[in-house]
Amino acid sequence: MAKAEKTLIVEQIGSPIRRDATQRQTLIGLGLNKIRRRSTLQDTPAVRGMVEKVKHLVRVVDAN
C-alpha cells in the first residue's frame, strides 16, 4: 500500500515589490503571484527551501 503524500498549503502575505528578482521568481515557482493567494504543494526538501527563501512573504497555512 502506497504512503499518502504530504502536502503544504502556502499563502502569500507580502508583496514582491522592491524585492530581489530571485524572490519574485521563487514566488512564481511556488504558484503564487497575488496577496492572499494559496497554493497546495508537495512537501519536499526543494519546496521547503523555496518557502524558507521567501518566508517573510509567505506563511504555511496547513501542513499534512
Image (spheres, rainbow, N blue to C red):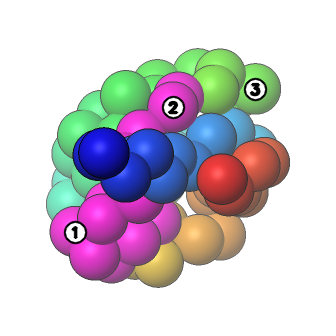
The magenta stretch spans residue 57: no
Amino acid carrying label 1: it is Ala
Q: Which of pointers 2 and 1 lies earlier in the amino acid sequence?
A: 2
Q: Residue at x 37, y 52 (%)?
A: 3
Which residue matches tag 1? 46
What is the magenta range? 39-51
- Is residue 19 among what the camera can see? no
Q: Which of pointers 1 and 3 lies earlier in the amino acid sequence?
A: 3
Which residue matches tag 3? 36
Badge 3 local density, few (<14 within 10 Å), some, or many (20+)?
Answer: some
- Is residue 7 among what the camera can see? yes
Q: Rounded to the nearest whole Å, what is the CA distance between mark 1 and mark 3? A: 22 Å
Which residue matches tag 2? 40
Q: Of residues 45 and 28, which is closer to you in this image?
A: 45
Q: Residue at x 21, y 60 (%)?
A: 22
Please state the horizontal and vertical placement of residue 15, each as a whole percent of the image: 62, 42
